[in-house]
Image (cartoon, rainbow, N blue to C red):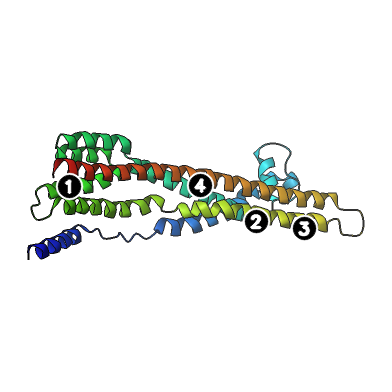
Amino acid sequence: MAETKTTVTAAAAKTTTSHQPKKSSNLFAALAVPICLVIGVLFYIFVLGSPANFQGGVVGGHPVEEGIGKWFGTVYQGGPIVPILITVLLICLTFVIERFLYLSKAKGKFSGAELVRKVQYHLANKNVDAALAECDKQQGSVGNVIKAGLKKYKEMISNTELDTDQKILTIKNEIEETTALELPMMEKNLVFLSTIASIATLLGLFGTVLGMIRAFASMATGGAPDSAQLAGGISEALINTALGIGTSAVSIIMYNYFTTNIDSITYAIDESGFTLTQSFAANHK
C-alpha cells in the first residue's frame, strides 16, 4: 500500500507542475511580409523609378551621371525582379531587428553563466530565496528556467512523501518543461532568415538569366547588335546578381549569429539544470 501511495503522489506532483504550451500566433510575421512587399514595390516605382534619376526625365533611359540618382536609376534598370529582391531584403532586415531585440531581452541583464555561478553559491549556503532573487534580477530565459526549477526545488525540500530520487526527477521535469517553452520562442522566425539565405540567391540568378536573355536577344536581330540593349541586358543581369548575393550574405551572417547566441543560452540552461539536481542530491538527501 505504501508503494502505491508514493507512485500516485509522484504522478500527481508532475501533473500539477506541468506547463501548458503557449498558443502564440505569429501575427508579426503575417503582417510584416505583405507590408514589406508593398513598401518594396512602391520604393521601386516611385523612388528608384523617379524621372529625376534619368537623363531628360525619361524613366528607363540613361541614368543621370552623378549623385544618388545615378545609383537609383541603375538599380531600376534591373527589371521586374528588383522589387521582389527589395522585398526579400526588407523582410530579412525586419526579422533581423525583431530577433535581435528579442534575444537581447532573452540574454537578460547579465550572462546566464554568471547567474548559474551565483545560484550555485546560494544553494551551497542553502539559501534558496537569495537564489530566486538573483533570477528576478537576471530577467532572461536562463533566469526564467532556473526560477521555475528553484520553486520546485524549494517545494521538494519540505516534501515528505517522495524519496530523494523522485524529488530530483520532479525538479528535472520542471526544468525540462520550462525549457520546452523558452527555446521555441528564441528560435521563432529564424526560418525566415534560413529561407531567405537560399531564395535570395535563386531570385538573383533568375534575374540574371532574364537579363542575359535580353542581352543575347539584342544580338540576334540579324544586323549589327544594338549596343544600348546589349548593355541594358548585361546591366540587368549584374544588378539582380548583386542584390541577390548581398541579401543572402546578410541573411546567412545574421542567422549564424542568432543561432550562436541561442546555443550559448541553451548551454547555460543545461548547466543550470545540472546545478539544481546536483545541489539537491548533495544537500537534501
The tag earlier along the polypeptide, 1 or 2, is 2
Secondary structure beneath disc 2? helix
Which residue is at a point 61% across and 45% down the rendered structure image? 246
Label 2, label 4: how many angstroms apart (C-alpha)? 19 Å
Mark 4 near mark 1, Cβ–Cβ under 8 Å? no
Q: In screen coordinates, is 86 left or right of 173? A: right
Q: In screen coordinates, is 114 left or right of 209? A: left
Q: Amino acid at mark 1?
A: Tyr
Q: Amino acid at mark 3?
A: Ile
Secondary structure beneath disc 4? helix
Q: Which numbered marker is on residue 213? A: 3
Q: Which numbered marker is on residue 93? A: 4
Secondary structure beneath disc 1? helix
The tag earlier along the polypeptide, 2 or 4, is 2
Figure check: 98 above or below 214: above
Label 1, label 3: how many angstroms apart (C-alpha)? 68 Å
The tag earlier along the polypeptide, 4 or 1, is 4
Mark 3 near mark 2, Cβ–Cβ under 8 Å? no
Q: What quarter of the picture does the C terminus occupy?
A: top left
Can you give x and y, in whole percent of width and height, for residue 159 in the image? 10, 51
Q: What quarter of the picture does the N terminus occupy?
A: bottom left
Mark 4 near mark 3, Cβ–Cβ under 8 Å? no
Can you give x and y, in whole percent of width and height, for residue 278 in the image? 22, 43
The tag earlier along the polypeptide, 4 or 3, is 4
Residue 144 visible in the current orientation: no
Mark 2 near mark 4, Cβ–Cβ under 8 Å? no
Label 4, label 1: how many angstroms apart (C-alpha)? 42 Å
The residue identified by callout 1 is 153
Which residue is at a point 62% across and 47% down the rendered structure image? 245
